Image (tube, rainbow, N blue to C red):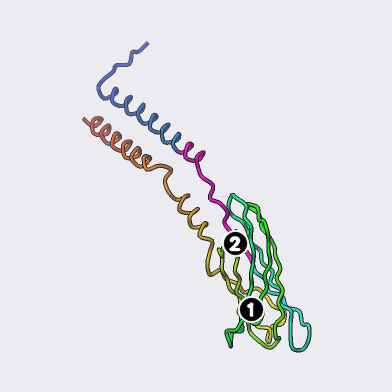
Amino acid sequence: MTKIKWTATKGWMLAIIIIALFLSAVIGLVIVIDKLNDEPVGSILVVEEVYFVSEETSSESMDLYVHVFVTNDGDEPCNSEIRAFAVDVETNLAMDEASLTVGRIDDQTTSESTLGMTLPSDGRYRVELLIFKDGKITVKGTGTVNLFEAGSGGKDYRTDQEDPSAKNAEDKEGAMPFPQIGAVALAVIAVALIAKRRWRR
């Protein structure tokens, strides 16, 4: 049986391996503890889709139905309300408005709501949507419909203001679990460089 002849270099290599395994275990433990201690990000409202559908009621007016799909991308439920204003593009006057209490939106679910307004059929309108979360305006968006040329409505919507909670959640996910992880990583690199130099000697 061949005996292992220990030298200073082999001793250093064994020590480095032990230190590296220890540091890897510490990093893994820190990440796990951080995940377990993650605070909920709360509720995050996102307007997924908005569709405009019109229905002619007379030669002078149309009923405009706004179908809104709102998703709660967070991990807590919230109460929501939607308000819509149909603003004449030419005069910048709100010709009609509607509001709807959506109620509770559970986390990771989508709620569908429909708001109705009656408008002159010969106009072009900017439909402004305000999405409330727990009594506060959180999301804003606009869409444009031209009832004079296209009486069938359609889909033309963009979100102008997103839920601030979404940005906070992204920042939290992108951050390192603990500042110490960076220091641990630097220590591993430093030990590896020292070992490399001693090995060459």
Where residue 98 sits, quadrant-wise, is bottom right
Considering only vertical position in the picture, is 166 above or below 185?
below
Q: Is residue 192 left or right of residue 164?
A: left
Identify the magenta region.
Answer: 31-49
Q: What amino acid does circle 1 point to?
A: Ala
Q: Earlier in the sequence, mark 1 or mark 2?
A: 1
Q: Is residue 51 above or below residue 33?
A: below
Please, what is the three-letter code of the amino acid marked with disc 2?
Answer: Gly
Q: How many neighbours does mark 2 have within 10 angstroms: few (below 14), some (14-19), or many (20 or more)?
A: few
Q: Which residue is disc 1 drawn over?
A: 86
Q: Nearer the viewer, residue 60 or 25?
A: 60
Neighbourhood count class around disc 1 (C-alpha, 10 Å): few under 14, some 14–19, many 20 upward: many
Residue 140 vertical placement versus 167 (above, below): below
Element carrying mark 1: strand
The residue lying toward the viewer, choosing from 144 and 140, is: 140
Quarter that holds the C terminus: top left
Rendered residue at 52%/67% (across/down): 161
* Label drawn at residue 150: none
Viewer-closest of 122 and 25: 122
Q: Tell me the number on the disc at residue 135.
A: 2
Answer with left or right where residue 175 lies relative to residue 116: left
Q: Position of residue 114 (x, y in %)?
A: 71, 68
Asked if marks 1 and 2 touch (Cβ < 8 Å), the reply is: no
